């Protein structure tokens, strides 16, 4: 028997993953790993098996729960869907340590996974093999480097813990303390540093078998933050650069590559890799790129679905984030109510009663309300 394992289903990205997979593979059995109650999962997702997976209590707790789950399902095939970052790190390490014949997933070797996961080692890899990446500096060189520079933790997500130094005087005692507590990568600060572009790829047996790019239209907050509206775009230069890197590395599975265009050299420079499913994965299926669907099909031993890309497609996180943007702007956002060719996070692909329930349970708690209203 086949089982599809989706972890961390308390999060909004995983709600979309489950909704898409249930729609595309209605006859496959889903196992939902969660830190929340089974009742939450039954209400939000309907008929699925629910298993405890402590993904937020450290590696040892996760290894314990994961081992019990694998033993429970014996020799059945368990297809792991790489969703949240920390959990995928744990799974990659677990599978790198132990032979698990009943787990099927598309992940590279553990050493290659760690290389791409670490911003410093990835930057070194790119510079060593001639793939465009930002110039790198050492901490001891900071007083004499050519400014501006960007400081970011070697392991981390988004902009958390990053510092932009525009002149020598910006290198304060506070930043020196931060650099002494955890390893940092120090790079040149690229022009148009907030204009990040994403390339999204599925690889199998060292070859890229599907790819697309999208462009951010609106974020919250405006100056740079979570993306609330993006559109499919055709960027062959970025895709070609991504293909060259991934096929050189012999990558396996899903990955998002983040680039910034450097108009000084006419190249896209790689700034980060996310070796798991990304927050806008719904656009992959809605646009016809079919990266998630083909990931599952390969794991099931099925032929891949033909890629038939739409000419135009958008993805939107309408409620509550974009709606709060509209309220803040007093309704002055052009084409705000236009939903043509648009898929909506936590809505499209889901059964509408369950979508409403998940949104209500996820948004209307004190922690999220503070974050949302603080952001808006």
Image (cartoon, rainbow, N blue to C red):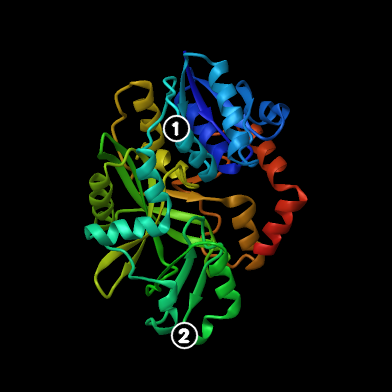
Q: Earlier in the sequence, mark 2 or mark 1?
A: 1
Q: Position of residue 312 (x, y in %)?
A: 37, 49
Q: Is residue 151 above or below residue 365?
A: below
Q: Residues within 10 Å of mark 2 (few under 14, many from 20)?
A: few
Q: Secondary structure at mark 1?
A: helix
Q: Which residue is mark 1?
A: 97
Q: Which of the labelled discs sits on residue 167, or is there none?
A: 2
Q: Is residue 119 above or below residue 51?
A: below
Q: Could you tell me which residue is drawn at 70 percent across and 52 percent down?
A: 368
Q: CA distance from mark 2 to mark 1?
A: 45 Å
Q: Could you tell me which residue is drawn at 51 percent across and 36 percent down?
A: 17
Residue closer to the observer: 177 or 263: 177
Residue closer to the observer: 276 or 149: 149
Q: Which of the labelled discs sits on residue 286, or is there none?
A: none
Left or right: residue 52 versus residue 126 is right
Task: Give the image quarter of residue 123.
Answer: bottom left
Task: Give the image quarter of residue 281.
Answer: top left
Tell me if I can see residue 202 in this picture.
yes
Q: Could you tell me which residue is drawn at 26 percent across and 51 percent down?
A: 245
Residue closer to the observer: 62 or 225: 62
Left or right: residue 61 versus residue 184 is right
Q: Could you tell me which residue is drawn at 55 percent across and 74 percent down?
A: 176
Left or right: residue 96 versus residue 267 is right
Q: Position of residue 271 (x, y in %)?
A: 38, 61
Q: Position of residue 112 (x, y in %)?
A: 35, 44
Q: Secondary structure at mark 2?
A: loop
Q: Position of residue 6 (x, y in %)?
A: 53, 31
């Amino acid at each position: 028997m086949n089982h599809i394992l989706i972890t961390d289903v308390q999060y909004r990205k995983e709600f979309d993953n489950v909704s898409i997979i249930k729609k595309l593979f209605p006859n496959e059995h889903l196992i939902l790993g969660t830190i929340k109650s089974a009742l939450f999962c039954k209400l939000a997702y309907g008929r699925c098996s629910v298993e405890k997976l402590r993904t937020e209590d450290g590696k040892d707790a996760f290894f314990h729960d994961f081992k019990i789950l694998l033993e429970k399902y014996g020799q059945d095939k368990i297809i792991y869907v790489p969703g949240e970052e920390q959990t995928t790190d744990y799974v990659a390490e677990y599978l790198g340590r132990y032979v698990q014949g009943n787990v099927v997933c598309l992940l590279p070797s553990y050493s290659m996974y760690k290389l791409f996961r670490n911003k410093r080692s990835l930057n070194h890899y790119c510079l060593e093999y001639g793939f465009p990446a930002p110039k790198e500096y050492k901490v001891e060189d900071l007083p004499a480097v050519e400014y501006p520079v960007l400081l970011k933790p070697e392991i981390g997500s988004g902009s958390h813990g990053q510092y932009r130094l525009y002149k020598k005087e910006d290198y304060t005692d506070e930043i020196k303390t931060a650099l002494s507590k955890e390893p940092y990568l120090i790079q040149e600060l690229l022009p148009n540093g907030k204009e990040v572009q994403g390339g999204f790829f599925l690889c199998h047996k060292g070859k890229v078998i599907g790819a697309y790019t999208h462009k951010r239209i609106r974020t919250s907050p405006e100056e740079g933050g979570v993306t609330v509206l993006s559109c499919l775009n055709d960027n062959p230069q970025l895709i070609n650069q991504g293909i060259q890197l991934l096929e050189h590395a012999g990558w396996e599975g899903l990955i998002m590559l983040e680039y910034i265009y450097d108009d000084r050299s006419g190249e896209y420079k790689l700034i980060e890799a996310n070796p798991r499913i990304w927050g806008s994965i719904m656009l992959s299926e809605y646009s016809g790129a079919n990266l998630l669907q083909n990931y599952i099909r390969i794991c099931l031993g099925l032929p891949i679905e033909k890629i038939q890309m739409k000419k135009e497609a958008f993805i939107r996180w309408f409620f509550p984030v974009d709606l709060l943007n509209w309220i803040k702007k007093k309704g002055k956002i052009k084409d705000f109510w236009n939903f043509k060719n648009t898929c909506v996070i936590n809505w499209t692909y889901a059964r509408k009663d369950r979508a409403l329930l998940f949104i209500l349970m996820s948004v209307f708690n004190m922690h999220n309300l503070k974050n949302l209203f603080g952001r808006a």
